[in-house]
Amino acid sequence: MQYLLLLYSNEKAWENLSEKDQEEGAAAYGAYTEALAQAGALVGGNRLRPTDTATRVSVADGKPQVLDGPYADSKEQLGGYYLIEAADLDAAIAWAARCPGAYHGIIEVRPIWPMD
């Protein structure tokens, strides 16, 4: 079964890290991604640009409404995701617990609902 691991953290915290700490963080994510791939669990994933680059779209009276910026002001922002294959929720949770983001933010584990 596929699960989406949604990585939430304070995106401003990364900017405040030293270059050394940023390099160590990037290496930790690289190692985690490689572990997922080696286990055959990695389906995909990406890092997201900061929320100030977001564009919101809704429709009112049949017309698109487009606004810049994040939808909500919150302490933690969605910064990336991994799509994984796991036997069950317990296995997906185990992968989420190994993610470097779990040490400085929140990993939300969501089962994929196929559209077939």
Image (cartoon, rainbow, N blue to C red):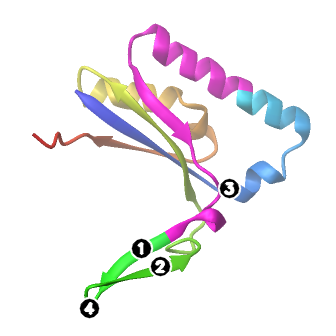
Mark 4: few/some/many CA within 10 Å (<14, 14-19, 20+): few
Residue for badge 1: 57
Mark 3: few/some/many CA within 10 Å (<14, 14-19, 20+): some
Residues marked 4 and 2 touching at CB (< 8 Å)? no
- Viewer-nearest of discs 1 and 3: 1
Q: Which mark is residue 66?
A: 2
Corner quadrant of residue 47: top right
Corner quadrant of residue 19: top right
Q: Give the CA distance from mark 4 to mark 1.
A: 13 Å
Residues marked 1 and 3 touching at CB (< 8 Å)? no
Mark 1: few/some/many CA within 10 Å (<14, 14-19, 20+): few
- Name the N-terminal-most of marks 4 and 2: 4
Quick check: 103 left or right of 36? right
Q: Give the CA distance from mark 1 to mark 3.
A: 22 Å
Q: Which mark is residue 61?
A: 4
Residue for badge 3: 11
Span shown in magenta? 27-55
Q: Position of residue 112 (x, y in %)?
A: 24, 40
Q: Give the CA distance from mark 4 to mark 2.
A: 13 Å
